[in-house]
Image (tube, rainbow, N blue to C red):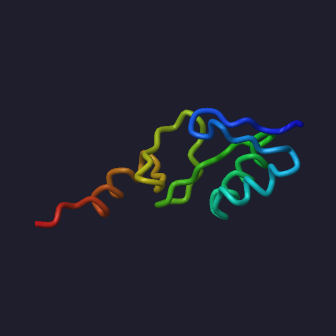
Amino acid sequence: MSGYKGICINKGIFVSDEDALEYAMEHTTQEEREQMIIGWFFSSNWVRKLSCCECEEIIHNGEDYSDYNGAIVCEECDTAYRLRHFRKVC
Protein backbone atom coordinates (compact mmCIF):
# COMPACT_ATOMS: atom_id res chain seq x y z
CA MET A 1 0.00 0.00 0.00
CA SER A 2 1.37 3.41 -0.99
CA GLY A 3 1.31 6.29 1.43
CA TYR A 4 3.23 8.38 3.91
CA LYS A 5 5.21 6.94 6.82
CA GLY A 6 5.70 9.39 9.67
CA ILE A 7 9.13 10.19 11.07
CA CYS A 8 10.28 12.27 14.04
CA ILE A 9 7.14 13.57 15.81
CA ASN A 10 4.96 11.52 13.43
CA LYS A 11 6.87 8.28 14.04
CA GLY A 12 4.56 5.28 14.02
CA ILE A 13 1.88 6.93 11.86
CA PHE A 14 1.09 5.73 8.35
CA VAL A 15 -1.36 7.54 6.09
CA SER A 16 -2.39 5.84 2.85
CA ASP A 17 -2.56 7.76 -0.41
CA GLU A 18 -6.34 7.40 -0.29
CA ASP A 19 -6.54 9.00 3.16
CA ALA A 20 -3.83 11.64 2.65
CA LEU A 21 -6.06 14.59 1.74
CA GLU A 22 -8.51 13.95 4.57
CA TYR A 23 -5.65 13.54 7.07
CA ALA A 24 -3.99 16.77 5.92
CA MET A 25 -7.29 18.68 6.12
CA GLU A 26 -7.88 17.44 9.67
CA HIS A 27 -4.39 18.44 10.79
CA THR A 28 -4.16 21.94 9.32
CA THR A 29 -6.07 25.18 9.80
CA GLN A 30 -7.77 27.12 7.02
CA GLU A 31 -5.09 29.82 7.33
CA GLU A 32 -2.28 27.27 6.98
CA ARG A 33 -3.92 25.78 3.89
CA GLU A 34 -4.36 29.21 2.32
CA GLN A 35 -0.69 30.06 2.87
CA MET A 36 0.39 26.69 1.44
CA ILE A 37 -1.70 27.03 -1.71
CA ILE A 38 -0.43 30.58 -2.31
CA GLY A 39 3.17 29.44 -1.77
CA TRP A 40 2.71 26.45 -4.08
CA PHE A 41 0.88 28.35 -6.81
CA PHE A 42 3.43 31.15 -7.01
CA SER A 43 6.49 28.91 -6.52
CA SER A 44 7.41 28.80 -10.21
CA ASN A 45 7.37 31.41 -12.95
CA TRP A 46 6.70 34.18 -10.42
CA VAL A 47 8.97 36.62 -8.59
CA ARG A 48 7.77 38.02 -5.25
CA LYS A 49 7.92 41.81 -5.08
CA LEU A 50 7.60 43.67 -1.80
CA SER A 51 6.23 47.18 -1.42
CA CYS A 52 6.91 49.68 1.34
CA CYS A 53 3.99 50.05 3.75
CA GLU A 54 4.73 53.78 3.99
CA CYS A 55 5.21 55.05 0.43
CA GLU A 56 3.93 51.92 -1.40
CA GLU A 57 6.94 51.93 -3.76
CA ILE A 58 8.14 48.52 -4.97
CA ILE A 59 11.39 47.40 -3.32
CA HIS A 60 13.63 46.07 -6.11
CA ASN A 61 16.18 43.28 -5.83
CA GLY A 62 19.29 44.46 -4.01
CA GLU A 63 17.63 47.43 -2.32
CA ASP A 64 17.73 47.62 1.45
CA TYR A 65 14.54 47.35 3.48
CA SER A 66 13.46 46.57 7.02
CA ASP A 67 10.86 44.05 8.13
CA TYR A 68 9.19 45.14 11.37
CA ASN A 69 7.13 42.04 12.17
CA GLY A 70 5.59 41.97 8.71
CA ALA A 71 5.63 45.72 8.06
CA ILE A 72 8.01 46.14 5.12
CA VAL A 73 9.67 49.58 5.05
CA CYS A 74 12.05 50.88 2.37
CA GLU A 75 15.35 52.47 3.33
CA GLU A 76 14.07 56.00 2.66
CA CYS A 77 11.05 55.60 4.98
CA ASP A 78 12.80 53.60 7.71
CA THR A 79 13.76 56.41 10.09
CA ALA A 80 10.34 58.10 9.95
CA TYR A 81 8.59 54.74 10.47
CA ARG A 82 10.72 53.91 13.51
CA LEU A 83 10.16 57.34 15.04
CA ARG A 84 6.38 57.05 14.62
CA HIS A 85 6.02 53.45 15.77
CA PHE A 86 8.79 52.90 18.28
CA ARG A 87 8.93 56.12 20.31
CA LYS A 88 9.51 55.55 23.98
CA VAL A 89 6.65 56.69 26.16
CA CYS A 90 7.91 58.38 29.33
Q: Where's the C terminus, which quadrant? A: bottom left
| Residue 55 in view, yes or no | yes
- Tell me: residue 59, above or below residue 55: above
Residue drawn 46% across the image and 48% down it: 74
Q: Which quadrant would residue 17 be assigned to in this image?
A: top right
Q: Kindly identify the residue that appears in the image at 45 percent across and 52 percent down.
A: 73
The spot of residue 34 in percent (x, y) is 69, 59
Quarter of the N terminus within the rendering: top right
* Residue at the limit of the structure toward the left, as seen here: 90
Tell me: 45 left or right of 30.
right
Left/right placement of residue 71 relative to residue 44 reads left
Q: Residue at 43% across / 45% down in the picture?
A: 66
Residue 78 rendering spot, x and y as whole percentages = 38, 50
Measuring from the top left, give residue 28's x and y in whole percent. Answer: 65, 57
Closer to the camera in the image, 43 or 63: 43
Residue at the front extreme, as displayed: 12
At 64% from the left and 33% from the top, the residue drawn is: 7
Q: Is residue 34 visible?
A: no
| Horizontal relation, residue 51 to residue 4: left or right | left
Q: For the image shown, how many numbered marks are present on the structure? A: 0
- Pick whichever, 82 or 37, lies toward us: 37
Between residue 54 and residue 14, name the one nearer to us.
14
Q: Position of residue 81 (x, y in %)?
A: 36, 58
Quarter where residue 82 is shown:
bottom left
